[in-house]
Amino acid sequence: MSQAENHADLQIVGMRCASCSSRLEKALNQLPDVSAVVNLATEKASVTFDPNLMDVDKLIQTVRDTGFDAHVTRDFAAEKADRLKAYQQEKLRFFISLALIAPMVLEMLLMVFEVHLAIPTWLQWALATPVQFWIGARFYRGAWASIKHGSGNMDLLVALGTSAAYFLSVAIILFDIHQPVYFESSAVLITLVLMGKLLEMGAKAKASSAIEKLIQLQPKIAHVERDGEVLDVSAGQLRPDDIFIVRPGENVPVDGVVLEGTSTLDESMLTGESMPQTKQTNDKVYTATLNHQGMIKCRATAVGSHTQLAAVVRLVEQAQGSKAPIQRLADKISGIFVPVVLLLALATLVIWYKIDGDLSYAIINAVSVLVIACPCALGLATPVTIVVASGLAAREGILVKDAAALERAHKLSVLVLDKTGTLTEGKPTLTDLRPSAASGVGELLRIAASLAQHSTHPLSGAVVEYAQTQATMPLPITDFEESPGSGLRANLDGVSYLLGSPAYIAQQGVTVDEASILALQMQGKSVIAVARQQVLLGYIAFADKIRPSSRAAVARLRGMGIRVVMLSGDNQATAQAIANQAGIEEFIAEVSPQDKARYVGSLKDKKTLVGMVGDGINDAPALAAADVSFAMKNGSDIAIEAADITLMRNDLNSVADAIDLSHVTLSKIRQNLFFAFAYNVLGIPLAGLGMLNPMIAGGAMAMSSVSVVSNALLLKQWRPGKPVSDSHDEAAANPENASSQLKA
């Protein structure tokens, strides 16, 4: 693929089954430098192409040449309107077809009660003809398109089956053959297929309801402040830096930052976190989150497609349109399925004719084989489950980038955790000021704040923030020099001062007290030292508090049979203290981002499936090296692009939830594939043995797709926090036992 590449999402019209999506995917991928994934459940093609060799118009033309139609995917509301229109048209055709077959169905039902209502064969012919060639015209069009491309699909099977029954009946009438006619079989079969598609369309709409709910949350009106007046304008008209007001009970119209006011906002629709979040000056607010009590004035920072909500919707759509590796099996089978079925139907026709000598009976049994074997359920088994699962994940603040990551997550055997921002809150706070005999508390803080005021290091920020709370003003400095990650040097009133890690200070020739430093580090604190020339002025200690949920989350992960390893850039003593607080037995301290990536790679070398949890920015090398990467959002938009799975709620329990959801999703996919295979494995022999009437076969075929989609919808019963199994629950409740079992 060329370095300069474009991406297009195409909405496909006319796909009926797995064979259709496989044929279209193959046609698109045969184009020069084109990579395409076609999803039957979402009826979309995700296409990456070289703009120097291909454009969207050529892609759409290829789709049309393959027998379908396509257009560039529009906004959700427009696509929903089209789907609703198509659904209404399908429903109208179904009821017309139902009305036409009603007399023939009534005749069959009355026969059960030994009431014989003889409908003339000419009337049956008249009723069945519009069903066959008007209502059923789509099957002929689809069949012809598949034949032109040297393949077969559901349309071909239905067209052949119903045509055989219809034309056999016509021959019986025209040649006055003393045999029953089968107009009701062909007409009822087409009606049942239509009914199945209607039910399938409704179920698929429910499967994709997660995106619709997200989009509906965005408010239509915003209160914008312009020239001292507050005006109500469309939320879509807001631009970056516009000032807007959010009143109690209203939703935030766009992403922004609070300028004035204090309130609590419900961010559960983005993060899955049920507790309202307090917002005050300089805090970020996000589109569609609900303002509970106070009025806040905000400045817009991201609007339209650049908001956090839009990014979430894009990611969910991307996941729903991607293809899980397990789908490859169904794709391979569907590619050869229709030709095999045609051979089986032909064999059924020949064998029954030789055995019984009754051509009409042989044809009807062959028709049953054609109809029962339609591969609709097989094509829907995986993608519709992924659609439901990715929507569920988004509801809980778990954004899955692609289906492959969701499939791999439950196979993880090792999970590597970054310490800062993952196990801890990621915001150090100053806890101790330990001046030496050469200084005092006030002087130590003032000098440290003066040196730290121009540094961007988190510990420097914590010093300045604490100094502000103590009304300690930093002094002007000169000749500022910083060694990233180690320390800094500056002049104050012509005198050289140092601030940095004890190791950095010691390298400058200053004597430090290792015992005092170690005592603080053993409490899980980070320590820096301050010196004037060669004289130590004291130590400052910081604590990055462990998240309240981290210990329980680690126990839960270990209960799932996952080996948990913590990596930290901190010294050995501080890392040991944090690991103890989190219940982690295995950790490595004083590692750089590059070392983290190498460690993840070394675990993979041992044929182990490795996951990595980090902040999505500093841990990017390790995240990229992992088999499945999880990024804690921490308020950064970059995290959404940094990992396979982004956790909108900064809680390690979300990792366990994602792994749990992966487990139940793969279980549901396997169930669906088993049912789809079992349906055909059992149905085809029964039809071949003459034990299935074509109408029963048609009804079973229609309901098989509905049953697969309905089974996928049962995933909506999943709730986060539930253990994968009873044994997992027991282990999570007793992490010591889980640890001993892992060691054994």
Image (spheres, grey):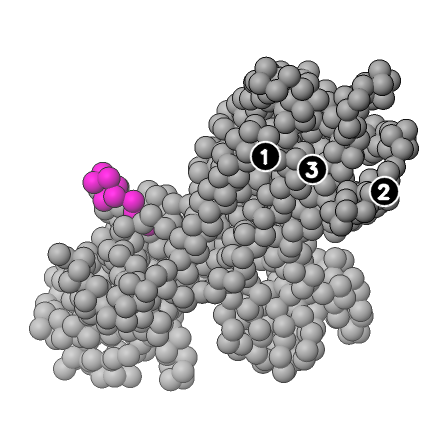
Q: Amino acid at mark 3?
A: Met
Residue 200 falls left or right of residue 562:
right
Q: Judging from the image, what secondary structure is the residue with disc 1 in?
A: loop
Q: Is residue 407 above or below residue 164?
A: below
- Between 569 and 723, which is closer to the camera in this rendering? 723
| 152 w.r.t. 551: above or below | above
For residue 677, the mark is: none
Provide the secondary structure element on which disc 2 rests. Answer: loop
- The magenta-colored residue range is 603-611
> Which residue, given by chain and number where applicable, does mark 1 sit on?
691
**Closer to the camera: disc 3 or disc 1?**
1
Image point 24% across, 80% down: which residue?
Answer: 433
| Residue 117 - label | 2
Q: Secondary structure at mark 3?
A: helix
- Which three-letter amino acid code belongs to the residue tagged 1? Met
Nearest the viewer among 460 and 109 is 109
Position of residue 743 relative to residue 38, above or below, is: below
Q: Name the residue: 43% across, 54% down.
A: 664
Viewer can see residue 720? yes
Which of the 4 image quadrants contains residue 513?
Answer: bottom left
Residue 569 visible in rendering: no
Mark 2 touches mark 3? (CB < 8 Å): no
Q: Report the amino acid beneath label 2.
A: Leu
